[in-house]
Image (tube, rainbow, N blue to C red):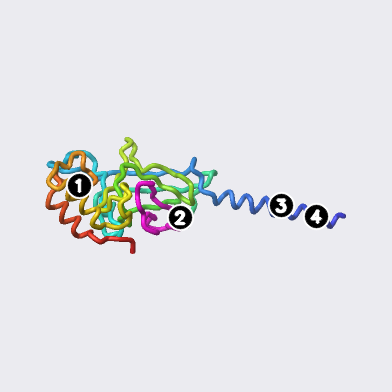
Amino acid sequence: MLKKSVVALSAALLAVCFAGTAAADIVCPDSSYCEVTFQNTYPTGSQFAGDPYDYLTVDAAGTGESFATFGIDIRVYLKNCQGEPLIGIPPQEIVMFNSNLCICPGGGASDAGTDSNGCATWTGTLAAGGCVDVIDVYADGVFICTLEDAGGRTVKLNSTDQAQNGTSPCFTDASDLAAFAAVLGQTAIGNICFDFNEFDETIDASDLAFFAAALGAACQ
């Protein structure tokens, strides 16, 4: 009887131990957070002149603009509910998301897994299509944040692939070309989804050149 009690007690303690370990490894949304800093501003001549540079142009092939190039600094800090950093969470578990984007497999993941501070970053581009003005971050399936700076300015994406309209998502093709041709020569104001060069106020030859280079882009 004593032997059975000892075995039962040992099993219970082991279960508690494993439960504690598991709980310590769980991403806690209350302790985790994101930091966004916009380091560049739009130049004179842009429809957003003087504002922080907050748009990135991407394509499904992953050959679009990079966050680092345009001074968009993004960091996510993942912690457990005791406030301890979660180290080594793999990049494929830390992803950007918006339901109006078409994101290729692995195309929204962070640069690398979390470091000793539980921090992961995005410095490159996304392999994605679509035009959105809000992007969320999830880790291990847990919502962490909407990417915005301290003043509430959000990170935004546009793309040669008009995936948000449901036209051949994750592929820049003739349907996207037709949509682009319909606004070519028009003001960029109100047409940000086609303004791939945000440095001026017109959908013009520079935007056409960017589109031409991305024509045929698809998930790799």
Magenta region includes residue 22: no
Label ID, residue 195: 1
The reply to whether discs 2 and 1 touch (Cβ–Cβ < 8 Å) is: no
Residue at (28, 56) in percent of width and height: 59
Between marks 3 and 2, how big is the CA–CA gap? 31 Å
Q: Is residue 218 above or below residue 71?
A: below
Which residues are the magenta region?
90-114
Q: Is residue 21 left or right of residue 136?
A: right
Front residue (pair 114, 162): 162
Three-letter code for the amino acid on which mark 3 is drawn? Leu
Q: Earlier in the sequence, mark 4 or mark 3?
A: 4
Residue at (71, 52) in percent of width and height: 13
Label 3 SS? helix
Q: Earlier in the sequence, mark 2 or mark 1?
A: 2
Residue 211 x %, y %: 20, 55
Q: Is residue 9 left or right of residue 108?
A: right
Between marks 4 and 1, how big is the CA–CA gap? 71 Å
Give the quadrant of the N terminus: bottom right
Q: Which residue is mark 3?
A: 13
Residue 193 x %, y %: 24, 46
